[in-house]
Image (cartoon, rainbow, N blue to C red):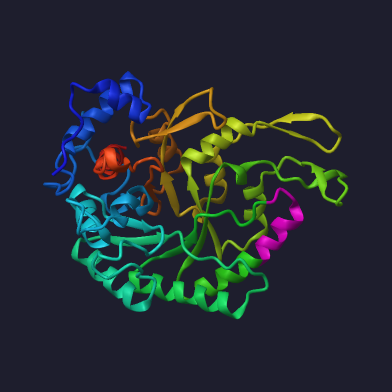
């Protein structure tokens, strides 16, 4: 069993998590409750003041992307005294209270049950059994998307394998953690739309919704007008953002998005103005919830990741444990509504604590569940 950080060590904890005093109190409360995270005793209690309250997010929709606890999944069970590998991590997450998971690959430590890679039909069957044993539902994945276009035979076959794996796991969605393209030019987004429409049709035939997960850059302004550069590419914008254009030129039946709410707020901070065709500077502040409402059913998944404003960093925010930051998730989910069909996945990129805090990612997963259940 692992001990939660001592109450006599608040400054060390604050420094490690980069929390202010208010955040430290919230995190310390959650971490103390998670002291036995290696084998949680039962579902995490609701946050203070919410006991008996019916949350806006139904219990069955409270999920986590496994990237948050990637260190636990990849540990050697022969040398680590705590949850390791998919089987034991599923057990730990279920005891915390989670009902959904999103995969971030199908690899684990070679000594864990099932072996190093479960990216196969047989591996998927094993994963499905462990999910079922713990009352968990796989909702999506950050998996393989062909880089080729037109598709090579090998890429196409591997993508079809991933649709088969997704179906065995019982997923409704199949996706990736990457943007459709890293370009800022309209022509490249047109090509990406053609490719994703084709992939979306393949996914739809398998009964799945294809989605792309995006960080801040995809919400920057599209270069689609103005004087051309030396390569013939446009240098100015009409004011439409890249992902907004992508939604416009892709088929709503085949292409969906997963909004990472943290990175959407980073985009709100970073991309407030653009250079119009006439060379003037135009202001336009990004509204993440409004973008969701405009496309609505095309946003079935979210990453619930929290941030603390910090004007000294380029992104304007630091990632902190979910529930300890200042992104107003209560307001966001009230605005976007339809909690019966939204699937928020707790994510914290910085959750793993390394060798000095090996239990930290599961402790933070518990803290995240407490906040998600209180919304």
- Residue pictured at 48% horizontal, 45% vertical: 260
Quadrant into which the C terminus falls: top left
Residue 257 x/y as whole percent: 52, 54
Residue 50 showing in the rendered view: no
Residue 324 counted in the magenta span: no
In this view, which residue lies farthest toward the front?
A: 79
In this view, which residue lies farthest toward the left?
A: 41
Magenta span: predominant SS is helix
In the image, residue 39 sits, relative to residue 162, either above or below, namely: above
**Considering depth in this image, is 46 or 324 the residue closer to the camera?**
324
Residue 190 counted in the magenta span: yes
- Residue pictured at 27% horizontal, 72% vertical: 126
**Considering depth in this image, is 251 or 349 the residue closer to the camera?**
349
Residue 91 x/y as whole percent: 19, 57
Quadrant into which the N terminus falls: top left
Left or right, residue 141 beside residue 7: right
Magenta segment range?
183-194
Residue 127 x/y as whole percent: 29, 68
- Residue pictured at 45% horizontal, 38% vertical: 335
């Amino acid at each position: 069993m692992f001990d939660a950080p001592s109450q006599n060590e608040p400054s060390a904890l604050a420094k490690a998590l980069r929390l202010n005093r208010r955040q430290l109190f919230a995190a310390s409360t959650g971490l103390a409750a998670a002291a036995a995270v290696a084998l949680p005793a039962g579902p995490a209690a609701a946050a203070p003041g919410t006991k008996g309250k019916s949350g806006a997010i139904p219990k069955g929709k409270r999920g986590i992307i496994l990237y948050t606890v990637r260190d636990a999944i990849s540990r050697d069970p022969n040398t680590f005294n705590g949850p390791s590998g998919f089987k034991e991590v599923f057990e730990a997450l279920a005891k915390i209270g989670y009902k959904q998971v999103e995969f971030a690959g199908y690899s684990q430590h070679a000594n864990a049950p099932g072996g190093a890679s479960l990216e196969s039909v047989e591996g998927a069957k094993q994963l499905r059994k462990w999910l079922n044993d713990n009352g968990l539902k796989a909702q999506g994945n950050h998996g393989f998307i062909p880089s080729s276009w037109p598709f090579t035979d090998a890429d196409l076959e591997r993508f079809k394998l991933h649709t088969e794996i997704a179906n065995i796991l019982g997923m409704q969605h199949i996706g990736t953690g990457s943007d459709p393209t890293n370009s800022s030019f309209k022509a490249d987004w047109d090509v990406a739309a053609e490719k994703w429409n084709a992939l979306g049709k393949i996914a739809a035939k398998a009964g799945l919704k294809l989605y792309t997960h995006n960080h801040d850059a995809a919400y920057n302004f599209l270069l689609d007008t103005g004087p051309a550069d030396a390569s013939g590419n446009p240098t100015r914008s009409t004011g439409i953002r890249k992902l907004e254009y992508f939604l416009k030129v892709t088929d709503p039946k085949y292409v969906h998005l997963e909004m990472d709410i943290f990175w959407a707020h980073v985009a709100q901070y970073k991309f407030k103005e653009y250079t119009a065709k006439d060379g003037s500077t135009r202001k336009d502040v990004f509204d993440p919830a409004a973008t969701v409402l405009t496309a609505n059913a095309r946003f079935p998944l979210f990453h619930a990741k929290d941030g603390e404003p910090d004007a000294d960093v380029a992104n304007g925010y630091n990632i902190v444990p979910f529930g300890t930051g200042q992104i107003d998730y209560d307001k966001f989910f009230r605005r976007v509504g339809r909690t019966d069909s939204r699937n928020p996945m707790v994510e914290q990129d910085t959750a793993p604590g390394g060798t000095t805090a090996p239990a930290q990612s599961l402790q933070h997963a518990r803290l995240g569940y407490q906040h998600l259940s209180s919304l």
